[in-house]
Image (spheres, rainbow, N blue to C red):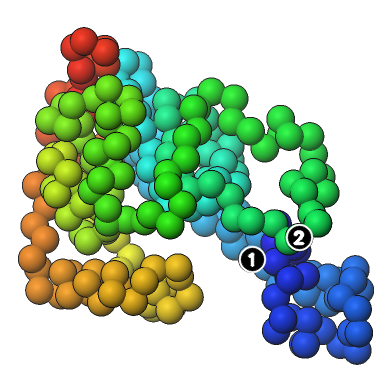
Amino acid sequence: QDTSLVRELPQPRRLAPMAEVFCQHDLDFYAPAIEAFRAARKRALNFYPGVGETLAELRRRGVLIICYTESLAYYSQYRFRKLGLDRLVDHLYSPPDHDLPEGLSREDIRFHAASHYALEHTDHRFTPVGEYKPNPDILRSILRDLGVAPDQAVYIGDNPHKDVWMAQQAGILDVYAAYGAVQDTEAYALLRKVSHWPDHDVVEEKRRIEDGSVQPSLTLNRFDELLNHICFTAFGRNNHGGG
C-alpha cells in the first residue's frame, strides 16, 4: 500500500524525474525512501519491557484482552502479526481500511493470498468511520459489544488526553502507561501537523497536558507493574473478570 499512495499523490508525481506517466520507473526513483521507512519500522516495532510476558500471564489467567487503536485495519493487522499479538489478544478494534484508488481492488495491490494478511486468532472488529479518540462512547460501545461492565474493565494507554481522559469519561478504571509517553517529542509534534486529528482535538490535547487537568488513577513505569496493582480474574459472561 505504500507504493499505491506514491502513485496517487500529486507531489511525488511532480518530483519524479521526467515523468509524463507515473509508472514503475518512478517507483524505482522513490524505492530508497520507501525501503528506509520499512527498515525504520522494522527496527522500532518491538514490545516495551514486560509487555509480552504480562499479556501472556493475563491470557493464562483467562482475562479478556482487547486492543483499541486508531491505526487502520491493514497496519493494525501487520503489527499484530509481527509482534505475535494474534496469539495473545482476544479482540482488536480499529477503523476499517482506507479507500483504494478507483479501479483497483485489494487483490490488485497484494503480493500474497488474502489469508496471509488476516489474523488467525484475534477477532478483528471495526469502529465507526470518522470516529477517533478521545470518544468515550466508542469505549462504552466496545464493552457493550462484548458484554463487559465498565466497572469490571481496565483501560491502559500512554496519552493523558486520548486515553486517560477518555477512559475516565467512560467510567472505566484508567491506567497511564508513562513509559510510552511521546507527547513532548519533536516526532509527536510533527505527527500532530500531518495527522487526521481535527484542529480542536490537537488544541484540547495540548491544553489538558499542559495544565495537568487530567490526573491518572494509576501510573505505570513498566507494563508488568500492572499485576502488582490489580487482581485480574478469568472472564465470564455472567461473572466478569477484570479485563
Of residues 88 and 114, the one nearer the viewer is: 114
> In this orientation, does residue 46 appear?
no
Which quadrant, please, contains the N terminus?
A: bottom right
Taking the image as shown, residue 165 lies to the left or right of residue 132, namely left
The spot of residue 216 in percent (x, y) is 12, 52
Within 10 Å of the Cα at label 1, are there few (<14), some (14-19), or many (20+) other Cα atoms? few
Residue at the spot of label 1: 37
Left or right, 121 with respect to 18, comes to: left
Indicate left or right for 241 with 87 as reference. left
Asked if residue 81 is positioned above or below residue 209 in the image, the reply reads above
Type of the residue with mark 1: Phe
| In the foreground, 234 or 170 | 170
Q: What residue is shown with label 2?
A: 102
Q: Position of residue 2 (x, y in %)?
A: 70, 62
Q: Nearer the viewer, residue 217 or 14?
A: 14
The residue at 14%/49% (across/down) is 169
For the image, the number of numbered tags is 2
Under tag 2, what secondary structure? loop
